């Protein structure tokens, strides 16, 4: 190959590289900015549309608590999401950018007042998630107003009230609760957890919850009453 031919080949390679690099950076940046959101609707299903507005064609629907990839949230109140590997849109008011439901793929072990309890997801109970432990089963649920734990045909409790923010208050069974922190870090025998929410209650309890994990720990007057000690894959 002559010097001229070699120079032309090198120039062509540089031009191809110059074209490819900006595309690679743009693709990478798009991947970084995408976040996970959860459908948060009290009843029915969330309509998915081809564009950011009710005048656009309906292309599908999503059930409550379905996880979705959110590319952006527009100023006009619509969110661009991934739907069946295509870009689509849903109303932002029905997309919650955090979830504190327990991980259905994991087995949890808690130490509560000296005893160990294992718990794991076993299926649905109506529109609730059903979990079993040493003493039976209980149910959990999350919607646009909060995170709940309960027992079939009995009482349920509000663990967290939404929208999630410091100072959020609610009363549950005559106990007043208040969110005092939302971006904490907490270490338990099961690991170190970030984005931890701390709730202070009028009965003297302080409870901690982690995103995508759920309940971590409960402390009463400085004494640990219950704590997550193990979190493993099924």
Image (cartoon, rainbow, N blue to C red):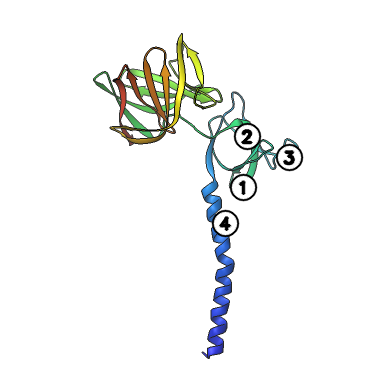
Mark 1 and mark 4 lie on one chain; the one further toward the N terminus is 4
Q: Residue at x 59, y 27 (%)?
A: 41
Front residue of 176 and 45: 176
* Lateral position of residue 25 relative to residue 74, left or right: left
Along the viewing direction, whichever of 146 and 208 lies nearer the viewer: 208
Nearer the viewer's eye, disc 1 or disc 4? 4
Q: Which residue is mark 4?
A: 26
- Earlier along the polypeptide chain: callout 2 or callout 1? 1
Whole-angstrom CA distance, mark 1 to mark 3, is 15 Å
Asked whether the viewer can see residue 115, the reply is yes
Which mark is first along the chain, 4 or 2? Answer: 4
Residue 92 marker: 2
Decide if residue 181 is on the left or right side of residue 84. Answer: left
**Residue 106 in the image, given as x and y percentages of width and height:** 37, 34
Pick whichever of labels 3 and 4 is earlier in the sequence.
Answer: 4
Real-space Cα distance between discs 2 and 1? 18 Å
Which mark sits nearer the N-terminus, 1 or 3?
3
């Amino acid at each position: 190959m002559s010097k001229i031919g070699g120079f032309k080949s090198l120039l062509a390679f540089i031009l191809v590289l110059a074209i490819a690099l900006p595309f690679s950076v743009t693709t990478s940046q798009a991947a970084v900015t995408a976040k996970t959101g959860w459908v948060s609707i009290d009843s029915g299903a969330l309509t998915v549309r081809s564009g950011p507005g009710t005048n656009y064609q309906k292309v599908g629907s999503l059930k409550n608590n379905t996880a979705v990839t959110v590319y952006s949230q527009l100023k006009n109140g619509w969110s661009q999401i991934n739907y069946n590997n295509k870009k689509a849109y849903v109303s932002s008011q029905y997309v919650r950018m955090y979830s504190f439901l327990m991980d259905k793929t994991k087995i949890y072990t808690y130490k509560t007042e000296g005893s160990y309890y294992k718990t794991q997801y076993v299926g649905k109970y109506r529109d609730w998630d059903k979990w079993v432990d040493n003493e039976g089963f209980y149910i959990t649920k999350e919607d646009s107003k909060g995170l709940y734990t309960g027992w079939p045909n009995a009482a349920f409790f509000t663990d967290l009230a939404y929208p999630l923010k410091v100072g959020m208050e609610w009363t549950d069974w005559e106990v007043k609760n208040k969110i005092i922190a939302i971006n904490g870090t907490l270490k338990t025998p099961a690991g170190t957890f970030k984005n931890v929410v701390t709730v202070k209650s009028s009965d003297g309890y302080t409870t901690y919850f982690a995103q995508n994990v759920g309940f971590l720990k409960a402390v009463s007057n400085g004494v640990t009453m219950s704590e997550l000690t193990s979190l493993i894959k099924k």
